Image (tube, rainbow, N blue to C red):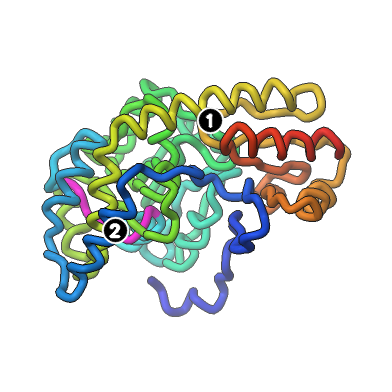
């Protein structure tokens, strides 16, 4: 991180509400968690009187099985954003140019600027048409947040090879890929994958994730990460959750079916972006998106003001939750 850049970089707005009286559609979190998590957490808490093993063998094996890579290619991190920061810190220097998609996750820009580097903005669906050679790093969000588009797998692999030939690392943020059937890019040469356990497993407060990279980049990630980067409860619950195959399959099915049902109900009233993620981006047209957010909050529902994303000025984003909760949100949107 470049100390001279810190005072010129602000915080980034996010969804999520800590108000327990609100039904939260502003953050894209699974409202369910795997069965057995509470017991696993309790047992892990009892083991927290000593430091965890710094090599995290169980967590690495679970993560490797989860995304399809070798355990020694996994670097544990306290959440997906920590994996993103670690990657940018190791690949980007002051004065560098970084190819950043938009509209997309706002923390990419913040982390690039904290390094004293310059984000080169490109529409998220045009990244694969760019030449990576002139950049220190290229970032891809798959599926993209806030639009929900998943990358074409063949195009992503082709572009990853192009980045490798150019000597430019490719960071693929797969925070929402677990909701899809698409294979991870974990283990692909020249690619750094950032994964979060926050979204799919409904555990945002646990702060567990990981990065995956091969070769020298993977070695550098492992050397640079902090010691004891995960607490014992986070590592133990994270490893357990990644092995819950039935839970993952059921979540994918529910989100897919509910997303389709919600989209069908909203099309015609809003321009609804097609999505492969657990959320839908709505263009509200000439209506005031801020007023829609306020109206929902008055009815104890939080939805995301998506005008905070670069390039969006008439949009809100809503998560896909449980059927009865989705019905409540649809009722509100039918009145605005």
Q: Quadrant of residue 49?
A: bottom left
78 within the magenta span: yes
Q: Residue under circle 2?
A: 41
268 versus 216 height, above or below: above
Q: Quadrant of the N terminus?
A: bottom left
> Residue 130's spot in the image, x, y percent?
47, 35
24 versus 317 height, above or below: below
State the extent of the magenta-drawn residues as a range.
Answer: 73-80
Camera-nearest residue between 183 and 34: 34
96 within the magenta span: no
Residue at the image position 36 percent from the left and 48 percent from the top: 197
Residue 286 shown left or right of residue 230 in the figure: right
Q: Which class describes the residues within 10 Å of circle 1: few (<14), some (14-19), or many (20+)?
A: some
Picture disc at residue 149: 1
The local secondary structure at tag 2 comes to helix
Picture disc at residue 181: none
> Residue 58's spot in the image, x, y percent?
14, 50
Residue 168 seen by the camera? no
* Mark sitting earlier along the chain (1/2): 2
Residue at the image position 18 percent from the left and 59 percent from the top: 222
- Marks counted in the figure total 2
Q: Quadrant of the C terminus?
A: top right
Q: Which class describes the residues within 10 Å of circle 2: few (<14), some (14-19), or many (20+)?
A: some
> Residue 189's spot in the image, x, y percent?
21, 37
Camera-nearest residue between 71 and 327: 327
> Residue 282's spot in the image, x, y percent?
71, 35
The local secondary structure at tag 1 comes to loop
Camera-nearest residue between 8 and 199: 199
Q: Quadrant of residue 142?
A: top left
Residue at the image position 29 percent from the left and 44 percent from the top: 241
What's the CA distance linking mark 1 and mark 2? 34 Å
């Amino acid at each position: 991180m470049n100390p001279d850049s810190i005072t010129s970089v602000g915080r980034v707005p996010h969804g999520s509400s800590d108000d327990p009286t609100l039904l939260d559609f502003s953050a894209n979190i699974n409202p369910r968690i795997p069965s057995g998590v509470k017991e696993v957490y309790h047992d892990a808490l009892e083991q927290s009187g000593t430091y965890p093993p710094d090599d995290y063998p169980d967590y690495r094996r679970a993560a490797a099985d989860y995304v399809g890579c070798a355990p020694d290619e996994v670097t544990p991190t306290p959440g997906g954003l920590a994996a993103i920061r670690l990657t940018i810190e190791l690949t980007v220097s002051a004065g560098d140019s970084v190819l950043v998609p938009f509209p997309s996750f706002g923390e990419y820009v913040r982390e690039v600027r904290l390094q004293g580097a310059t984000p080169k903005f490109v529409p998220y669906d045009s990244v694969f048409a760019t030449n990576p050679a002139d950049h220190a790093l290229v970032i891809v969000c798959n599926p993209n947040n806030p639009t929900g588009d998943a990358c074409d797998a063949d195009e992503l692999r082709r572009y990853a090879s192009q980045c490798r030939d150019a000597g430019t690392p490719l960071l693929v943020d797969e925070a929402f890929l677990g909701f899809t059937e698409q294979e991870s890019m974990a283990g692909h040469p020249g690619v750094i994958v950032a994964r979060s356990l926050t979204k799919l497993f409904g555990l945002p407060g646990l702060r567990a994730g990981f990065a995956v990279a091969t070769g020298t980049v993977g070695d550098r990630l492992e050397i640079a990460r902090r010691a004891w980067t995960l607490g014992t409860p986070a590592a133990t619950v994270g490893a357990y959750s990644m092995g819950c195959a039935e839970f993952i399959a059921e979540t994918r099915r529910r989100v897919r079916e509910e997303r389709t049902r919600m989209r069908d109900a909203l099309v015609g009233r809003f321009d609804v972006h097609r999505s492969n993620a657990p959320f839908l981006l709505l263009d509200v047209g000439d209506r005031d998106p801020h007023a829609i957010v306020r109206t929902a909050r008055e009815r104890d529902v939080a939805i995301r003001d998506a005008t905070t994303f670069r390039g969006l000025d008439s949009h809100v984003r809503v998560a896909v939750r449980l059927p009865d909760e989705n019905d409540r949100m649809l009722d509100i949107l039918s009145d605005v």
